[in-house]
């Protein structure tokens, strides 16, 4: 494809030019980046948004039509089972909303819209190192780069370093 068409397609879809022309594979982009690409998408059925993302995350899961928005949570659960990239948890609530709004606070995003302001650069190089780290490798502060996580009947069990937000709100 010609460069102007690639740029136009990238502007319309929000998908990085390198992912469209394949000098970098889609799988080299962070989970947060991929969610951000989908932030402006709307579907007729709630579950279709999750199902249309299966390919870019290389996920296989049963399609359960009628489950609605539960499919998006199920997709995120499948992603963390297969990836050590924690950028999936780097979403933001809309300005002015409280963390306690909604049914209950959750580490999983309720929608791809919460990734609309996602910026890999704010997370630094850490998320890329994590995916390539050996099991016992540590970062410069002595934290393990690879973190074991598990889904339990009580929720997600994980130990992560928290990165303070630049926005005090």
Image (tube, helix red, strand yellow):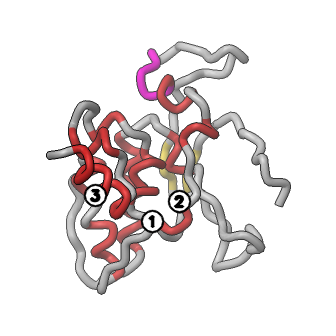
Question: Which image quarter: residue 94?
Answer: bottom right
Place of residue 21 in the rendered image (x, y in percent of width and height, measured from the top left) = 21, 40
State the residue position of label 3: 9
- The magenta region covers 130-134
The secondary structure making up most of the magenta span is: helix
Q: Nearer the viewer, residue 155 or 78?
A: 78
Per the image, the residue denoted by label 2 is: 115
Using the rendered view, name the quadrant where residue 12 is placed.
bottom left
> Mark 2, residues whose alpha carbon is within 10 Å: few (<14), some, or many (≥20)?
many
Label 2 close to label 1 by CB (< 8 Å):
yes
Report how far apart the C-alphas of labels 3 and 2 lie in the structure.
20 Å
- Name the side, left or right, on which 152 lies relative to 99: left
Where disc 2 sits, the SS reads: helix
Sequence-first disc among 1 and 3: 3
Q: Residue 36 location, x and y as percent?
A: 46, 56
Instruction: Find out whether residue 131 is within the magenta segment.
Output: yes
Say which residue label 1 marks: 39
Could you tell me how many numbered marks the image carries? 3
Residue under the image location 24 percent in, 44 percent down: 3
**Mark 1: which secondary structure?**
loop
Quadrant hosting residue 109: bottom right
Q: In 3D space, how far apart are the residues under numbered discs 2 and 1 (Cα atoms)?
A: 6 Å
**Residues under numbered marks 3 and 2 in contact, where contact means CB atoms less than 8 Å apart:** no
First of labels 3, 2 by sequence position = 3
Measured from the top left, where is residue 67 in percent x and y?
33, 80
- Mark nearer the N terminus (2 vs 1): 1
Q: Nearer the viewer, residue 24 or 115?
A: 24
Which quarter of the rendering shows the C terminus? bottom right
How crowded is the residue under tag 1: few (<14 C-alpha within 10 Å), some, or many (20+)?
Answer: many
Residue drawn at 43 percent across, 46 percent down: 31
Confirm whether the magenta stretch covers residue 127. no
- Judge depth for marks 3 and 2 and give the one in front: 3
């Amino acid at each position: 494809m010609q460069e102007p068409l690639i740029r136009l397609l990238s502007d319309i879809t929000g998908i990085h030019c390198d992912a469209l022309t394949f000098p970098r594979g889609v799988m080299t982009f962070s989970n947060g980046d991929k969610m951000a690409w989908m932030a402006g998408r709307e579907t007729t059925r709630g579950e279709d948004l999750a199902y249309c993302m299966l390919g870019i995350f290389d996920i296989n899961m049963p399609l359960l039509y009628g489950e609605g928005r539960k499919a998006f949570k199920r997709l995120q659960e499948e992603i963390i089972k297969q990836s050590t990239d924690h950028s999936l948890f780097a979403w933001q609530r809309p300005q002015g909303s409280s963390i306690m709004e909604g049914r209950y606070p959750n580490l999983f995003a309720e929608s791809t819209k919460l990734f609309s302001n996602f910026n890999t650069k704010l997370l630094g190089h850490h998320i890329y190192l994590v995916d390539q780290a050996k099991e016992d490798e540590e970062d410069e502060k002595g934290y393990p780069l690879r973190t074991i996580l598990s889904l339990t009947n009580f929720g997600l069990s994980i130990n992560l370093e928290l990165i303070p937000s630049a926005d005090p709100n």
